[in-house]
Amino acid sequence: MSGHSKWSTIKHKKAKTDAVRGRVFTKLIREITIASREGGGDPGGNPRLRLAIQAAKENNMPAENIERAIKKGTGELEGQILEEFSYEGYGPAGVALIIDVVSDNRNRTTGEVRHALTKHGGSLGENGCVSWNFETRGVITIDKKGVDEDRLMAAALDAGAADVSDEEDVFEVYTEPVDLSAVSEGLKSAKFSFDAAEVRKVPKTYVKLDGEDARKVIRLVEALEDLDDVQRVSANFDIPDEILQG
Protein backbone atom coordinates (compact mmCIF):
# COMPACT_ATOMS: atom_id res chain seq x y z
CA MET A 1 0.00 0.00 0.00
CA SER A 2 1.32 3.45 -0.86
CA GLY A 3 2.16 5.65 2.10
CA HIS A 4 -0.64 8.11 1.47
CA SER A 5 -3.21 5.36 0.94
CA LYS A 6 -2.18 3.87 4.28
CA TRP A 7 -2.45 7.34 5.84
CA SER A 8 -6.04 7.63 4.61
CA THR A 9 -6.91 4.32 6.27
CA ILE A 10 -5.31 5.40 9.57
CA LYS A 11 -7.26 8.69 9.44
CA HIS A 12 -10.58 6.90 9.04
CA LYS A 13 -9.83 4.75 12.09
CA LYS A 14 -8.82 7.80 14.14
CA ALA A 15 -12.04 9.56 13.12
CA LYS A 16 -13.98 7.07 15.23
CA THR A 17 -12.45 8.42 18.45
CA ASP A 18 -14.12 11.13 20.54
CA ALA A 19 -11.00 13.32 20.43
CA VAL A 20 -11.39 14.11 16.73
CA ARG A 21 -15.11 13.48 16.18
CA GLY A 22 -16.07 17.15 16.64
CA ARG A 23 -13.69 18.24 13.89
CA VAL A 24 -14.86 15.41 11.64
CA PHE A 25 -18.48 16.47 12.20
CA THR A 26 -17.65 20.01 11.04
CA LYS A 27 -16.12 18.72 7.81
CA LEU A 28 -18.98 16.27 7.18
CA ILE A 29 -21.62 18.96 7.77
CA ARG A 30 -19.92 21.18 5.21
CA GLU A 31 -19.77 18.33 2.70
CA ILE A 32 -23.48 17.61 3.19
CA THR A 33 -24.31 21.31 2.81
CA ILE A 34 -22.29 21.69 -0.40
CA ALA A 35 -23.65 18.44 -1.85
CA SER A 36 -27.23 19.56 -1.13
CA ARG A 37 -26.62 22.96 -2.66
CA GLU A 38 -25.09 21.52 -5.82
CA GLY A 39 -27.38 18.52 -6.39
CA GLY A 40 -30.52 19.02 -4.29
CA GLY A 41 -31.66 17.65 -0.96
CA ASP A 42 -32.88 14.23 -2.12
CA PRO A 43 -30.12 11.65 -1.60
CA GLY A 44 -31.94 9.30 -3.97
CA GLY A 45 -31.10 11.58 -6.87
CA ASN A 46 -27.87 13.03 -5.52
CA PRO A 47 -25.01 10.48 -5.27
CA ARG A 48 -22.62 12.91 -3.62
CA LEU A 49 -25.15 13.69 -0.90
CA ARG A 50 -25.91 10.00 -0.44
CA LEU A 51 -22.23 9.24 0.20
CA ALA A 52 -21.89 12.23 2.54
CA ILE A 53 -24.89 11.08 4.59
CA GLN A 54 -23.48 7.56 4.71
CA ALA A 55 -20.14 8.89 6.02
CA ALA A 56 -21.98 11.01 8.61
CA LYS A 57 -23.96 8.01 9.86
CA GLU A 58 -20.80 5.89 10.06
CA ASN A 59 -19.37 8.59 12.34
CA ASN A 60 -22.52 8.53 14.51
CA MET A 61 -23.72 12.00 13.55
CA PRO A 62 -27.23 12.65 14.92
CA ALA A 63 -30.00 12.61 12.30
CA GLU A 64 -31.08 16.15 13.18
CA ASN A 65 -27.58 17.47 12.39
CA ILE A 66 -27.71 15.80 8.99
CA GLU A 67 -31.17 17.17 8.24
CA ARG A 68 -30.18 20.68 9.29
CA ALA A 69 -27.09 20.59 7.04
CA ILE A 70 -29.23 19.48 4.09
CA LYS A 71 -31.71 22.30 4.66
CA LYS A 72 -28.91 24.86 4.84
CA GLY A 73 -27.66 23.58 1.51
CA THR A 74 -31.07 23.77 -0.17
CA GLY A 75 -31.78 27.19 1.33
CA GLU A 76 -34.63 26.05 3.58
CA LEU A 77 -32.57 27.24 6.55
CA GLU A 78 -30.28 30.25 6.65
CA GLY A 79 -26.59 29.43 6.70
CA GLN A 80 -23.15 30.61 5.71
CA ILE A 81 -22.37 31.16 2.04
CA LEU A 82 -19.77 28.45 1.45
CA GLU A 83 -17.31 28.22 -1.44
CA GLU A 84 -15.50 25.06 -2.54
CA PHE A 85 -12.00 25.33 -4.02
CA SER A 86 -8.48 23.87 -3.89
CA TYR A 87 -4.89 24.94 -3.32
CA GLU A 88 -1.80 23.29 -4.77
CA GLY A 89 1.65 23.33 -3.27
CA TYR A 90 4.69 21.46 -2.05
CA GLY A 91 5.82 19.95 1.21
CA PRO A 92 9.30 19.01 2.43
CA ALA A 93 11.39 16.97 -0.03
CA GLY A 94 9.21 18.12 -2.94
CA VAL A 95 6.08 16.21 -1.93
CA ALA A 96 3.12 17.38 -4.04
CA LEU A 97 0.00 18.56 -2.19
CA ILE A 98 -3.57 19.32 -3.20
CA ILE A 99 -5.61 20.91 -0.40
CA ASP A 100 -9.40 20.84 -0.88
CA VAL A 101 -11.29 23.39 1.19
CA VAL A 102 -14.80 24.66 1.90
CA SER A 103 -14.80 28.21 3.21
CA ASP A 104 -16.96 31.25 3.86
CA ASN A 105 -13.91 33.54 3.65
CA ARG A 106 -11.30 32.84 0.97
CA ASN A 107 -8.81 35.41 2.30
CA ARG A 108 -8.86 33.91 5.81
CA THR A 109 -8.45 30.39 4.47
CA THR A 110 -5.58 31.36 2.17
CA GLY A 111 -3.75 32.93 5.10
CA GLU A 112 -4.25 29.88 7.32
CA VAL A 113 -3.16 27.42 4.63
CA ARG A 114 -0.12 29.51 3.70
CA HIS A 115 0.88 29.80 7.39
CA ALA A 116 0.65 26.03 7.94
CA LEU A 117 2.68 25.32 4.80
CA THR A 118 5.39 27.85 5.64
CA LYS A 119 5.65 26.77 9.29
CA HIS A 120 6.23 23.14 8.31
CA GLY A 121 8.63 23.57 5.40
CA GLY A 122 6.15 23.74 2.54
CA SER A 123 5.05 26.37 0.06
CA LEU A 124 1.93 27.41 -1.81
CA GLY A 125 2.09 26.95 -5.58
CA GLU A 126 0.20 28.09 -8.65
CA ASN A 127 -2.94 26.31 -9.83
CA GLY A 128 -1.88 23.36 -11.99
CA CYS A 129 1.61 23.02 -10.53
CA VAL A 130 0.95 19.52 -9.14
CA SER A 131 -2.57 18.50 -10.21
CA TRP A 132 -1.17 16.92 -13.39
CA ASN A 133 0.30 14.20 -11.15
CA PHE A 134 -3.07 13.18 -9.66
CA GLU A 135 -6.16 11.48 -11.05
CA THR A 136 -9.59 11.70 -9.44
CA ARG A 137 -11.01 8.27 -8.60
CA GLY A 138 -13.66 6.74 -6.42
CA VAL A 139 -12.07 4.58 -3.72
CA ILE A 140 -13.88 2.08 -1.48
CA THR A 141 -11.77 0.69 1.37
CA ILE A 142 -12.64 -2.78 2.69
CA ASP A 143 -10.99 -4.52 5.64
CA LYS A 144 -9.49 -7.81 4.48
CA LYS A 145 -10.59 -9.76 7.54
CA GLY A 146 -13.00 -12.50 6.48
CA VAL A 147 -13.25 -11.27 2.88
CA ASP A 148 -12.83 -13.63 -0.06
CA GLU A 149 -10.91 -11.73 -2.75
CA ASP A 150 -12.45 -13.60 -5.69
CA ARG A 151 -15.99 -12.98 -4.43
CA LEU A 152 -15.18 -9.31 -3.82
CA MET A 153 -13.67 -8.95 -7.28
CA ALA A 154 -16.74 -10.49 -8.92
CA ALA A 155 -19.17 -8.34 -6.92
CA ALA A 156 -17.18 -5.16 -7.53
CA LEU A 157 -16.91 -5.67 -11.28
CA ASP A 158 -20.60 -6.60 -11.50
CA ALA A 159 -21.41 -3.33 -9.71
CA GLY A 160 -19.35 -1.32 -12.21
CA ALA A 161 -15.95 -0.98 -10.50
CA ALA A 162 -12.83 -0.41 -12.58
CA ASP A 163 -10.41 -2.45 -10.47
CA VAL A 164 -9.73 -4.06 -7.08
CA SER A 165 -6.32 -3.72 -5.47
CA ASP A 166 -4.82 -5.83 -2.66
CA GLU A 167 -3.23 -3.32 -0.27
CA GLU A 168 -1.77 -5.30 2.65
CA ASP A 169 -4.50 -5.20 5.32
CA VAL A 170 -7.30 -3.80 3.13
CA PHE A 171 -8.75 -4.11 -0.36
CA GLU A 172 -9.28 -0.92 -2.33
CA VAL A 173 -12.03 -0.91 -4.95
CA TYR A 174 -11.48 1.75 -7.62
CA THR A 175 -14.26 3.35 -9.63
CA GLU A 176 -14.90 6.31 -11.87
CA PRO A 177 -16.02 9.17 -9.59
CA VAL A 178 -19.55 9.16 -11.06
CA ASP A 179 -19.86 5.42 -10.37
CA LEU A 180 -18.76 5.49 -6.72
CA SER A 181 -22.23 5.63 -5.21
CA ALA A 182 -23.63 2.87 -7.44
CA VAL A 183 -20.65 0.58 -6.79
CA SER A 184 -20.82 1.14 -3.03
CA GLU A 185 -24.55 0.31 -3.08
CA GLY A 186 -23.82 -2.80 -5.14
CA LEU A 187 -21.21 -3.97 -2.64
CA LYS A 188 -23.59 -3.36 0.26
CA SER A 189 -26.23 -5.44 -1.54
CA ALA A 190 -23.62 -8.19 -1.87
CA LYS A 191 -23.13 -8.03 1.93
CA PHE A 192 -19.74 -6.33 1.94
CA SER A 193 -19.08 -3.67 4.57
CA PHE A 194 -16.46 -0.99 4.08
CA ASP A 195 -14.51 1.55 6.09
CA ALA A 196 -14.86 4.40 3.58
CA ALA A 197 -16.24 5.28 0.16
CA GLU A 198 -14.88 8.56 -1.12
CA VAL A 199 -13.73 10.46 -4.15
CA ARG A 200 -9.97 10.78 -3.79
CA LYS A 201 -7.16 12.38 -5.77
CA VAL A 202 -4.78 9.47 -6.34
CA PRO A 203 -1.12 10.22 -7.18
CA LYS A 204 0.36 8.84 -10.41
CA THR A 205 3.91 8.87 -8.99
CA TYR A 206 5.22 8.90 -5.42
CA VAL A 207 8.09 10.41 -3.45
CA LYS A 208 9.68 7.85 -1.11
CA LEU A 209 10.52 9.36 2.27
CA ASP A 210 12.10 8.16 5.49
CA GLY A 211 13.49 9.60 8.69
CA GLU A 212 13.09 13.29 9.47
CA ASP A 213 11.73 14.22 6.02
CA ALA A 214 8.90 11.73 6.53
CA ARG A 215 8.09 13.10 9.98
CA LYS A 216 8.12 16.69 8.65
CA VAL A 217 5.61 15.80 5.93
CA ILE A 218 3.33 14.05 8.44
CA ARG A 219 3.40 17.12 10.72
CA LEU A 220 2.54 19.35 7.76
CA VAL A 221 -0.37 17.20 6.60
CA GLU A 222 -1.72 16.99 10.16
CA ALA A 223 -1.47 20.79 10.54
CA LEU A 224 -3.39 21.30 7.30
CA GLU A 225 -6.05 18.72 8.20
CA ASP A 226 -6.52 20.41 11.58
CA LEU A 227 -7.69 23.61 9.85
CA ASP A 228 -11.48 23.94 10.02
CA ASP A 229 -11.82 24.90 6.35
CA VAL A 230 -9.72 22.01 4.99
CA GLN A 231 -11.81 19.06 3.85
CA ARG A 232 -9.02 16.80 2.65
CA VAL A 233 -5.33 16.79 1.75
CA SER A 234 -3.99 14.69 -1.12
CA ALA A 235 -0.25 14.04 -1.28
CA ASN A 236 2.16 11.79 -3.16
CA PHE A 237 4.35 10.63 -0.29
CA ASP A 238 5.35 7.01 0.31
CA ILE A 239 6.33 6.61 3.97
CA PRO A 240 7.13 3.40 5.92
CA ASP A 241 4.31 2.07 8.11
CA GLU A 242 6.28 2.35 11.34
CA ILE A 243 6.61 6.12 10.86
CA LEU A 244 3.01 6.60 9.72
CA GLN A 245 1.67 4.79 12.76
CA GLY A 246 4.15 6.34 15.20
Image (cartoon, grey):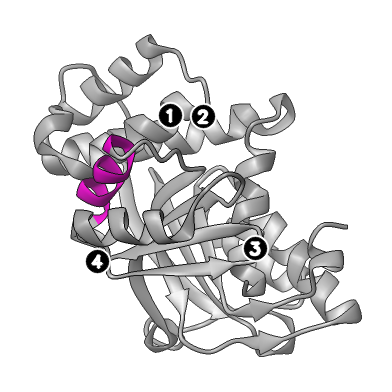
Sequence-first tag of 3 and 1: 3
Sequence-first tag of 3 and 4: 3
Q: Position of residue 79 (x, y in %)?
A: 30, 25
Which region of the structure is painted magenta?
Answer: 180-189
Q: Position of residue 159 (x, y in %)?
A: 21, 54
Identify the mark at residue 25; answer none if there is no mark: 2
* Residue indicated by mark 4: 176
Q: Residue at x 20, y 34 (%)?
A: 36
Sequence-first tag of 1 and 4: 1
Q: Give the SS element for disc 1.
A: helix
What's the distance in space between the residues labelled 1 and 4, CA to CA? 22 Å
Q: Are marks 3 and 1 in contact (CB under 8 Å)?
A: no
Q: Is residue 106 visible?
A: no
Q: Residue at x 62, y 29 (%)?
A: 21
Q: Residue at x 64, y 31 (%)?
A: 16
Would residue 238 be found to the left or right of residue 215 on screen?
A: left
What's the distance in space between the residues labelled 2 and 4, CA to CA? 26 Å
Sequence-first tag of 2 and 1: 2
Q: Main secondary structure of the magenta part?
A: helix
Q: Type of residue at label 3?
A: Lys
Q: Nearer the viewer, mark 2 or mark 4?
A: 4
* Residue indicated by mark 1: 56
